[in-house]
Amino acid sequence: MPYLQLEVIRNYPYATKKLLAKRIGETYSKIMKADQNRITVSIRELGEGSIWRCGDEEPMPAAIMMCDIRKGRDAHLRIALSKALIEMCNEVLGLETGQLNIEFTQHSGDEMYHQRLGSFSADWTANEGSL
């Protein structure tokens, strides 16, 4: 954990997705004070007509990022992360302003096992980023 899942309606080159994953990992680690070794990013290219944002007018093409994270960060950190991720995705993927929404699901550390790290995650603490 965290698991950051981006769903988009276009296809992108491998190098673009790799660059975006790297930048997402670095940005998440810095803002949320987390070990980059815990971060997993997926980019799902669902195709044109697969994601829609509804409203009073006609539905518009959309994108969404679901962020499964360890609980403990205040809303200000999650807002800062959301703004940084939206700006980054708009820049790297050419998304339109207003197209990407960010949603968070927060978990305790013992809800995510890391094979690479050999254990469950510890609950998040503000000291983690300084280790």
Image (spheres, rainbow, N blue to C red):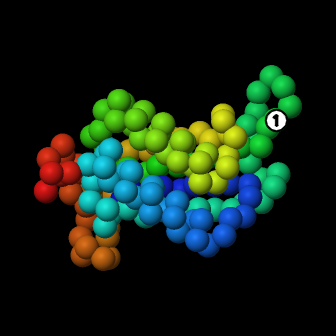
Nearest the camera: 59 or 30?
A: 30
Residue at x-position 74% and y-position 55%: 9
Q: Is residue 34 found left or right of 57 in the rendered image? A: left
Q: Which residue is mark 1?
A: 59
Q: Is residue 44 found left or right of 121 in the rendered image? A: right
Q: Looking at this view, name the residue that lies furthest to the top.
A: 56
Q: Is residue 108 found left or right of 97 in the rendered image? A: left
The answer, for residue 47, to whether it is visible in the render is yes
Residue 67 percent across, percent down from the top left: 47, 49
The answer, for residue 112, to whether it is visible in the render is no
Quadrant in the picture for the N terminus: bottom left
Q: Is residue 126 above or below residue 22?
A: above
Quadrant in the picture for the C terminus: bottom left
Q: Is residue 124 above or below residue 97?
A: below
Q: Is residue 98 found left or right of 111 in the rendered image? A: right
Disc 1 on helix, strand or loop?
Answer: loop
Query: What is the three-letter code of the residue carrying label 1?
Result: Pro
Residue 96 position by quadrant: top right
Residue at x-position 82% and y-position 51%: 49
Nearest the camera: 108 or 78?
A: 78
Residue 127 percent across, percent down from the top left: 14, 47
Nearest the camera: 131 or 113?
A: 131
Residue 56 position by quadrant: top right
How many labels were placed on the picture? 1
Residue 105 position by quadrant: top left
Q: Looking at this view, name the residue that lies furthest to the front.
A: 91
Q: Is residue 29 above or below residue 82?
A: below
Residue 84 percent across, percent down from the top left: 46, 41
Mark 1 Cα-neighbour bin, 10 Å: few <14, some 14–19, many ≥20: few
Residue 73 percent across, percent down from the top left: 29, 38
